[in-house]
């Protein structure tokens, strides 16, 4: 069928609130919009089975919430302090995420997500990373998938319209400066066999809930599902301000099927082996030379279950040296690394383990056998998960790498999750940069659910009327489609193949802007990034003619390439400002701390300057590469009036929204 993407007479639909994306955050936002009386909404998505939320997890994917079990005392302010203490997070956002945590959690419980509880109805919990109390909970490896499945069921029962097989390629805005506002989006139909496959469609909207996930598509080494590339670049291209882009999480993950190898995958202490590029020859257990004993090595491997992801505070004499050694094998030496559950490592002895590791395995009744047998005892679903994806870890080793996993930064939103500089644009979920440098494990799921409540409530109460200048928005849509058509035309005539372009920027980002960083590498990378962006703007991306799938990827490359350039600029700013090594990123510095006595001088790294925990990095993008960046003081916890009558009056009058 001929590609109809070049037809300017595309479908145009007007809606009060457009929800872009169908992850857990976007789905809940749609439900809460309806609950708040907003009837005219539509969810537009690449597919309900696409995206990160429904395709990712870990051995026991955590949902982090307010504690609600037994005698352990908790409160919104206490939970907010746990968010805030990680650094570089605004106090009002921390308080909002804490205050709405029970409401968001019980909403999921009430629609059927089976979070575990005891016979008395108490919701049991456990401690996760950066968590002082037992606030974590889980429904197993697929917590976020279960959330999505139940949210989707609710959407269908409520008959909330969902349009699938659509890829957003342009965010529409009107106005300039302080008057700039979102007014809709241009999407491309990705529906093989349908007459409109490859056509552009215009959605005009008074409000846009932007739930497009994290920047998975800018990295070559990534645990984001392959079907999820992210679309933060659409907002960056529109001039949306960002916050804390350099703060991301990286951790070891399998790469044949992208999945985090945390928790019991490490606690059963698999063998770490590396091979030549063929995956078979020259097999080595490469970790042992870097540890004082076999027991010390195996205890560090065990701790990776607790202490995943990569954490620069745990490099020196800690478990995160394992991540660095895996990086050296895979990236610098060009070898392949595997977890082998089929046998114990050379010299393995339970009695040589640390007390923590030994006691954990003892309490789990797993002081026996080989790793796969221990894994079957402790967590059989962890084995079944790979079997479901045609990987049998009982008979073959599991290939891993250190991968991009989550961006703590993102677009800058206020305490109602509205963009700080583009009105009526509500970035929610991972695309919103509400987190700081460190966050408790599983808190992102809480944040995304809270965001749906906040955006929906504000839209209903502050933006409930139809106020869009439809003629101006329609004109903006037609102009955007013409520009997109021109981009495709140029690419077909003179551009490089879109696959070549993507390989280039993904490789650059994983090399210079991931968990191992240096000033020299970032200076070179940012210059290269802007050169590629200039080339792409001038010449486009070549794609097969009359092939809608390739046209979509060519246009997707535009926002992804711009995204990686902006991220590199932000990472470079943080490194050159002297933030040092923090979170899941290590900054190389020849005058810094040695990562390990056996590693070369180049593996010295800069210590964290903790003063930067009191500020956040704001990044204002520019199409020409003149990016404005500024460190601003983070907002403290807000003062609030706890006197009931006063608070009640403010609520009744709607003053809380202004």
Image (cartoon, grey):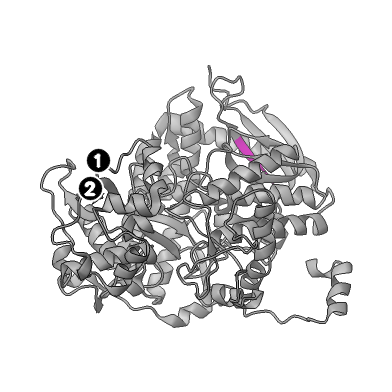
The reply to whether residue 180 is in sight is: no
Q: Residue furthest top?
A: 1
Residue 83, given in percent of the width and then of the height, sits at: 55, 72
The disc, 2 or 1, on the residue closer to the chain's N-terminal end is: 2
In the image, 572 versus 398, the foreground residue is 398
Question: How far apart are labels 2 and 1 at the CA level?
Answer: 7 Å
Q: Secondary structure at mark 1?
A: loop
| Of the pair 649 and 286, the residue shown nearer to us | 286
The count of marks equals 2
Indicate whether residue 239 is drawn in magenta.
no
| Residue range highlighted in magenta | 183-187
Numbered mark located on residue 238 in the image: none
Q: Position of residue 263 (x, y in %)?
A: 39, 59
Residue lying at 58% horizontally and 38% vertically, measured from the top left: 48
Label 1: few (<14), some (14–19) or many (≥20) C-alpha neighbours in 10 Å:
few
Q: Residues within 10 Å of mark 2 (few under 14, many from 20)?
A: some
Which residue position is annotated with label 1?
395
Residue under numbered circle 2: 342
Helix, strand or loop at label 2? It is loop
- Residue beneath the point at 63% across and 64% down: 122
Is there CB contact under 8 Å for labels 2 and 1? yes
Q: Is residue 186 magenta?
A: yes
| Residue 70 located left or right of residue 562 | right
| Rendered location of residue 602, percent (x, y) | 20, 69
In terms of secondary structure, what is the magenta stretch mainly?
A: strand
Horizontal side, residue 309 vs residue 648: left or right: left
């Amino acid at each position: 069928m001929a590609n109809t993407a070049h037809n300017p007479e595309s479908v145009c639909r007007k809606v009060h609130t457009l929800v872009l994306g169908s992850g857990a955050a976007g789905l809940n936002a749609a439900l809460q919009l309806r609950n708040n009386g907003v009837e005219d909404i539509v969810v537009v998505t690449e597919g309900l089975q696409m995206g990160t939320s429904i395709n990712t997890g870990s051995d026991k994917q955590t949902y982090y919430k307010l504690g609600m079990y037994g005698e352990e005392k908790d409160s919104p302010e206490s939970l907010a302090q746990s968010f805030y203490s990680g650094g570089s997070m605004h106090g009002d956002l921390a308080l909002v995420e804490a205050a709405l945590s029970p409401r968001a959690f019980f909403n999921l419980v009430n629609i059927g997500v089976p979070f575990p509880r005891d016979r008395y109805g108490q919701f049991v919990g456990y401690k996760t990373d950066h968590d002082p109390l037992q606030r974590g909970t889980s429904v197993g490896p697929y917590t976020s998938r279960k959330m999505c499945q139940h949210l989707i069921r609710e959407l269908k029962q409520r008959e909330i319209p969902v349009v699938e097989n659509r890829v957003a390629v342009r965010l529409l805005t009107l106005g300039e400066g302080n008057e700039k506002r979102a007014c809709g989006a241009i999407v491309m139909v990705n529906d093989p066999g349908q007459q409109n496959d490859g056509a552009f469609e215009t959605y005009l909207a008074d409000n846009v809930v932007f739930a497009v996930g994290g920047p998975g598509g800018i990295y070559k080494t990534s645990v984001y599902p392959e079907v999820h590339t992210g679309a933060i670049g659409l907002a960056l291209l529109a001039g949306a301000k960002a916050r804390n882009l350099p703060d991301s999480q990286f951790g070891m993950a399998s790469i044949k099927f992208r999945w985090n190898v945390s928790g019991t995958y490490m606690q059963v202490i698999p063998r770490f082996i590396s091979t030549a590029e063929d995956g078979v020859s020259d097999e080595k257990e490469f970790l042992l030379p870097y540890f004082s004993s076999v027991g010390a090595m195996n205890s560090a491997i065990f701790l990776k279950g607790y202490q995943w992801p990569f954490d620069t505070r745990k490099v020196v004499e800690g478990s995160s040296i394992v991540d660095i050694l895996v990086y050296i094998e895979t990236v610098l030496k060009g070898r392949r690394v595997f977890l082998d559950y089929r046998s114990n490592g050379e010299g393995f002895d339970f009695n040589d383990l640390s007390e923590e590791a030994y006691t954990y395995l003892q309490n789990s009744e797993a002081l026996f056998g080989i790793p796969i047998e221990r894994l079957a005892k402790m967590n059989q679903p962890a084995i079944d998960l790979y079997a479901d994806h045609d990987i049998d870890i009982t008979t073959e080793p599991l290939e891993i790498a250190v991968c991009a996993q989550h961006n703590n930064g993102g677009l800058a939103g206020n305490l109602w999750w509205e963009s700080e500089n583009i009105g009526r644009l509500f970035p929610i979920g991972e695309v919103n940069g509400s987190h700081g440098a460190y966050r408790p494990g599983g808190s992102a799921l809480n944040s995304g659910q809270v965001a749906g409540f906040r955006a929906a409530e504000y839209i209903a109460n502050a933006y409930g009327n139809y106020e869009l200048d439809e003629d101006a928005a329609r004109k903006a849509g037609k102009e955007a489609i013409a520009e997109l058509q021109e981009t495709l035309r140029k690419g077909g005539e003179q551009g490089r193949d879109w696959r070549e372009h993507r390989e280039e920027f993904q490789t650059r980002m994983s090399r210079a802007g991931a968990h191992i960083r240096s000033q020299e590498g970032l200076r070179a990378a940012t210059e290269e990034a802007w050169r590629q962006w200039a080339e792409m703007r001038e010449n486009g991306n070549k794609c097969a003619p009359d092939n809608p799938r390739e046209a979509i990827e060519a246009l997707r490359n535009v926002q992804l390439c711009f995204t990686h350039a902006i991220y590199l600029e932000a990472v470079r700013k943080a490194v050159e400002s002297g933030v040092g090594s923090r979170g899941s990123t290590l900054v190389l510095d020849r005058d810094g701390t040695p990562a390990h006595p056996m590693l070369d001088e180049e593996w010295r790294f800069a210590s964290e300057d903790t003063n930067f925990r009191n500020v956040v990095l704001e990044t204002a993008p520019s199409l020409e590469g003149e990016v404005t960046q500024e460190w601003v003081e983070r907002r403290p916890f807000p003062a609030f009036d706890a006197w009931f009558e006063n608070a009640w009056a403010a609520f009744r009058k709607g003053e809380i929204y202004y």
